[in-house]
Amino acid sequence: MSLERVILPEAEDELDRAYAWYEERRVGLGLEFLGAVEAAMSEAAEFPMRWPIWMMDDRYRRIVLRRFPSLIFYEIRGETIEFVAVAHARRAPGYWLDRGPTR
């Protein structure tokens, strides 16, 4: 059973900006990036425990994309998987920690 997917608006914005950046570099590269992100998110929704817990905050798990220098952070919330960040690998770790519902 696949978890319901929620992508926070800030993560959507990051995804949109990264798509535009890759697309400016080469037509079609942005679509390849989106495909890699979609595949990772779909697999995470199907197998949420597959990726390791993030060492800075054990509420989150981290997916490292192979082809693109990007990380996807998510939290499992009951029957929902909440994607909180689509981050470039060189961004400061945890810049996105204040996103989402108050804990």
Image: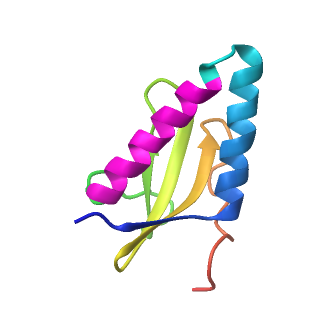
Give percent across and percent down for residue 87: 62, 45
- Quick check: 48 above or below 90? below
Name the residue located 69 percent from the left edge and 24 percent from the top edge. Answer: 22
Q: Quadrant of residue 100?
A: bottom right
Quarter of the picture containing the N terminus is bottom left
Is residue 69 among what the camera can see? no
Q: How many marks do you count on the picture?
A: 0
Residue 34 falls inside the magenta stretch? yes
- Quick check: 85 above or below 60? above
Quarter of the picture containing the C terminus is bottom right
Give percent across and percent down for residue 30: 64, 27
Structure colour scheme? rainbow
- The rendered magenta stretch, by its main secondary structure, is classed as helix
Is residue 74 among what the camera can see? yes
Name the residue located 43 percent from the left edge and 50 percent from the top edge. Answer: 41
Q: Is residue 50 left or right of residue 16?
A: left
Name the residue located 71 percent from the left edge and 23 percent from the top edge. Answer: 23
Q: Quadrant of residue 45?
A: bottom left
Residue 83 falls inside the magenta stretch? no
Residue lying furthest top: 26
- Quick check: 94 above or below 86? below
Residue lying furthest bottom: 103
Name the residue located 37 percent from the left edge and 50 percent from the top edge. Answer: 42
- Quick check: 45 above or below 66? below
Give percent across and percent down for residue 72: 51, 48
In magenta, the rendered stretch is 30-46
